[in-house]
Image (tube, rainbow, N blue to C red):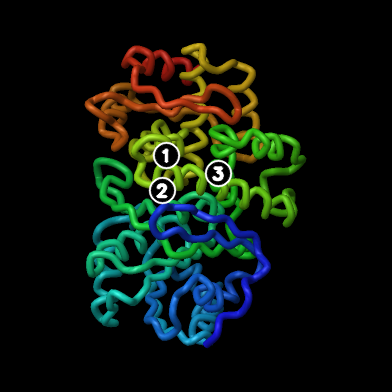
Amino acid sequence: MTAAPPLPHRRIAVALDRDPYEVVIGDGCLQETGKALLQAGVREGRQILVVSNPDVAELYGATCLESLKHHGFKTELLLIEAGEQHKTPATVAQIHDAAFQHRLERSSLMLALGGGVVGDMTGFAAATWLRGIGVIQVPTTLLAMVDASIGGKTGVNHPGGKNLIGAFHQPQLVLIDPATLASLPIREFRAGMAEVIKYGVLGDPNLFELLEACPEPNHPAGLGSELLETLLERSCAEKARVVAADEREGGLRAILNYGHTFGHVVETLCGYGTWLHGEAVAIGMVAVGELAVQRGSWSRELADRQRQLIERIGLPSRWPSLNDQAVLTTLQGDKKVRDGKLRFVMPRGVGKVEIRDDISREEILRCLEALKS
């Protein structure tokens, strides 16, 4: 089958030295999944294991599978339970079992249809099946669209911390259909907006200002389709820029963890499922903003602008009631610790951050005390 001309959608190149790929954004992308794969160089006839969860598959599974079959791909559908509590090696084993049952070969693919949890586990399963087969990411949540689906970070949680078990495994294509956000619960949408704010603070001040200028940034209709696609494009472009410069987090890529160090503490100590990932990141951004203010590297005015935008979107901003010693212990177990030193991504302005590893235990305790007031 001859591939049709490229679909008229927004395209962002993830310009890796090895195995570059595209992020394709546009309404109707899901109905063109098969065509998009052919345009990305995937040969027809390949076997594809589509991994999703029951809720997403009920809405979009048939559309995705029909498009793949129409364009000559052999497909199987596997449903797994989503949610952070299911992001475990046991769930990945279910994907491996399906890969064995359906005799996936090295030329076969896995396709993740769903949110970040489905994407992370499918990517990790693909990275570890036959020492690595191709994966396609088709995210259906805002958080997955702007963050989890791009960059090749895959993994599962360990009782001791989030995403401690994983691998880098880049997708061959990321296909984003904003229309799927219409069915996303509003809490999930707002959680994804935390990552959009993050991109504004770490590298795109215009993106931050676009959000500030929007009268109703807390729901899709308030943004409107044009602004929503612009936010998706700018967020994905910022993620792609950082990933292309540092694929395996040797240096620059660590800035993508802005808000995540304190955020992972919130997730771990409050229990996975108490807060959505984006909600925990929002709390983490406020917390690290307070730490930066105390250090004199960020102004109170900028910290207030960040907090006010987080609250306008309907995200939590207050630090939960946690034991300080438990916080310190959890921070020390974070996978970003190097040589025993905690590494924080600290804001220096809207659009500028830095990585610091010279923050003392006493500074963290002072910050936690200030967050309680």
Q: Which residue is mark 2?
A: 273
In what element is the residue under mark 1? Answer: helix
**In front: 365, or 70?**
70
- Check disc 2: other Cα within 10 Å, few if <14, some if 14-19, many if 20+: few
- Horizontal and vertical percent for residue 218? 67, 45
Q: CA distance from mark 1 to mark 2?
A: 27 Å
- Horizontal and vertical percent for residue 307? 60, 28
Amino acid type of the residue tagged 1 in the rendering: Arg
Q: Residue at x 54, y 64 (%)?
A: 175
- Residue furthest front in the image: 17
Q: Which residue is mark 1?
A: 253
Task: State whether residue 365 is above or below residue 65.
Answer: above
- Check disc 1: other Cα within 10 Å, few if <14, some if 14-19, many if 20+: some
Amino acid type of the residue tagged 3 in the rendering: Glu
Give me the disc on residue 238: 3
Precedes in sequence: disc 1 or disc 2:
1
In what element is the residue under mark 2? Answer: loop
Judge from the rendering whether residue 213 lies leftward or rightward of residue 2; answer left or right.
right
Precedes in sequence: disc 2 or disc 3:
3
Q: Residue at x 54, y 57 (%)?
A: 141
Amino acid type of the residue tagged 2 in the rendering: Gly
**Residue 91: in sight, yes or no?**
no
**In front: 142, or 168?**
168
